[in-house]
Image: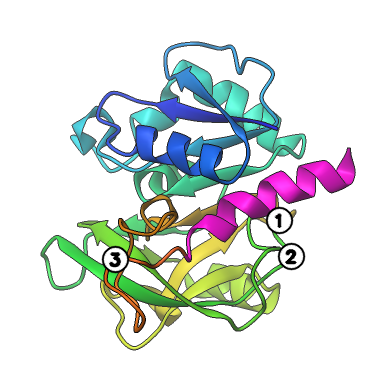
Amino acid sequence: MRVGVITFPGSLDDRDAQRAVRLAGGDAVPLWHGNHDLQGVDAIVLPGGFSYGDYLRCGAIAAHSPIMAEVVSAANAGMPVLGICNGFQILVESHLLPGGLVRNDHGSFICRDQKLRVENTSTAFTTAYSEGQEITIPLKNGEGGFIADAETLARIEGEGQVVFRYLDVNPNGSLNDIAGIRNERGNVVGLMPHPEHAVEEGFGPNTPEAMSSGTDGLAMFVSVIQNSLLSA
């Protein structure tokens, strides 16, 4: 399976996302923000970072990059798309996901290993998890507070579009402890924590068994590859 990873000016975690795809068994395809060519990929990852320096609003400029016209078209046709941190912000700014992301309620950048609960396993990126599973993956953001108006929030909750929810501590003031959501179709997922930083032992969060041995993020990349094989 070919998974495209888009690099925007200011992307930081594009290489990490490519490595996560390879560790999950996929073929990582680097894509450039200024092109219109998706190079025949089967799924897309928008990585974390600070696209265009986030000078206007996180993800707002990147949402108008040439390649995003192709991403929106492909997503609306059913292609799996995952947005991580800044990628999540870009998906919201592109109107592929509802709501918005604002500055953390405490006003500071935060970096920590974050515990999450998997709320929905029907998306392209969560079928390898079990519903209610508790996982730990790193989180690092300054504008990660998820917001939505009351009507939108009720619809997101009512239709099961919350995919991940913060546990133990809400690190940024997100409404209803929401860490990640999906679109109505379930092929587009965005989350603030970073699964690509928890895919191989020695480099992930600490676990009760050993330091830096957490690999809870790998299942997100395995899910989309397994689903592709099942539908082939």
Which of the pair 81/161 is nearer the observer?
81
Numbered mark located on residue 186 in the image: 1
Numbered mark located on residue 212 in the image: 3
Q: CA distance from mark 3 to mark 1?
A: 31 Å
Magenta-colored span: 216-232
Question: Can you give x and y, in whole percent of width and height, for residue 138 in the image?
Answer: 32, 63
Question: Can you give x and y, in whole percent of width and height, for residue 56 in the image?
Answer: 22, 36
Proximity of marks 3 and 1: CB atoms separated by less than 8 Å: no
Residue named by callout 2: 122
Proximity of marks 1 and 2: CB atoms separated by less than 8 Å: yes
Label 3 residue SS: loop
Q: Above or below — where is 232 with respect to 204?
A: above
The dominant secondary structure in magenta is helix
Numbered mark located on residue 50 in the image: none
Residue at 37%, 33% in the rendered image? 15
Amino acid at pointer 2 = Ser
Amino acid at pointer 1 = Gly
- Quarter of the picture containing the C terminus is top right
N-terminal label among 1 and 2: 2
Residue at 37%, 60% in the rendered image? 193
N-terminal label among 3 and 1: 1
Residue 95 is at least partly visible in this image = no
